[in-house]
Image (cartoon, rainbow, N blue to C red):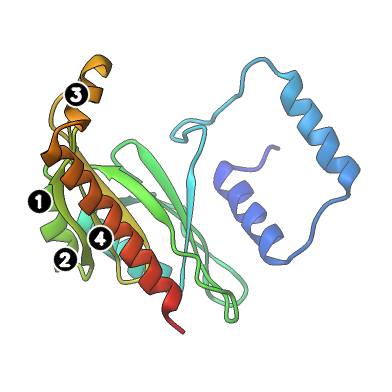
């Protein structure tokens, strides 16, 4: 019987956590088999690429995602490892699946950087703040037609919040980015990210 996708994901996470690797021949055989297929089979619910979010307190992260972005924990996805830590859990935000698990003592911080589309950036920032996040970048309209903001959540993950305001034709982008106001907005967005990451790097 083929194992469930959730069980396979947990086994994969435990494999990496244990610090063990299969023999090179096994890896090459696996890659060769994948490349021979003309079409990649993706199970229902999942995208071709899905994010792992590793936190000191995954349960708290799930609560944050629920409060800030309306995430829904996938029923039956939460599994504990032999230490009693969360070895695997999944949440859904809209049609996207995020997979999460607890960090172990001695592991370095691994903050995730994720983008989420929302219907109202200002409102999403307010919800995130109410759930314990702090603002990194205030809502800012950029030349390509999206209003963006950034927040750092209580577990240290950085969230790009995007609201699509309008569709901008590719041929209009050059003239829009030449506008001094657009250049100033982009400079602010870039500067706040740089300052945030530099501050994180300077912390002991």
Residue assigned mark 2: 129
- Of marks 1 and 3, which one's residue comes earlier in the chain? 1
Q: Identify the residue at image location x=73%, y=24%.
A: 35
For residue 122, the mark is 1
Q: Quadrant of residue 97?
A: top left
Q: CA distance from mark 1 to mark 2?
A: 11 Å
First of labels 4, 3 by sequence position: 4
Instruction: Give the alpha-carbon distance from disc 4 to disc 1, as whole Å.
Output: 11 Å
Q: Secondary structure at mark 1?
A: helix
Depicted 138 relative to depicted 196: above or below: above
Q: CA distance from mark 1 to mark 3?
A: 27 Å
User: Going by the picture, which residue comes out furthest to the bottom?
Assistant: 204
Q: Are marks 1 and 2 in contact (CB under 8 Å)?
A: no
SS class, disc 4: strand
Cα distance, mark 2 to mark 3?
35 Å
Residue 175 is labelled as: 3
Q: Are marks 4 and 2 in contact (CB under 8 Å)?
A: yes
Which mark is on residue 151?
4
Picture quarter with the N terminus: top right
């Amino acid at each position: 019987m083929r194992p469930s996708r959730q069980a396979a994901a947990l086994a994969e996470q435990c494999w990496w956590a244990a610090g063990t690797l299969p023999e090179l021949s096994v890896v090459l055989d696996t890659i060769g088999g994948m490349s021979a297929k003309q079409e990649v089979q993706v199970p229902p619910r999942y995208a071709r690429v899905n994010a792992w979010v590793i936190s000191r307190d995954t349960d708290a992260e799930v609560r944050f995602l629920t409060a800030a972005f309306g995430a829904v924990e996938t029923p039956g996805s939460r599994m504990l490892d032999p230490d009693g830590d969360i070895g695997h859990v999944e949440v859904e935000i809209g049609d996207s699946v995020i997979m999460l698990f607890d960090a172990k003592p001695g592991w370095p911080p691994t903050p995730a950087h994720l983008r989420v589309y929302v219907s109202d950036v200002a409102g999403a920032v307010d919800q995130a703040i109410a759930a314990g996040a702090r603002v990194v970048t205030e809502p800012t309209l950029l030349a390509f037609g999206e209003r963006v903001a950034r927040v750092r959540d209580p577990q240290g993950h950085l969230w790009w919040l995007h609201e699509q305001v309008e569709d901008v034709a590719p041929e209009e982008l050059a003239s829009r980015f030449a506008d001094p106001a657009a250049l100033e907005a982009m400079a602010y967005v870039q500067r706040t990210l740089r300052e945030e990451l530099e501050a994180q790097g300077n912390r002991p």
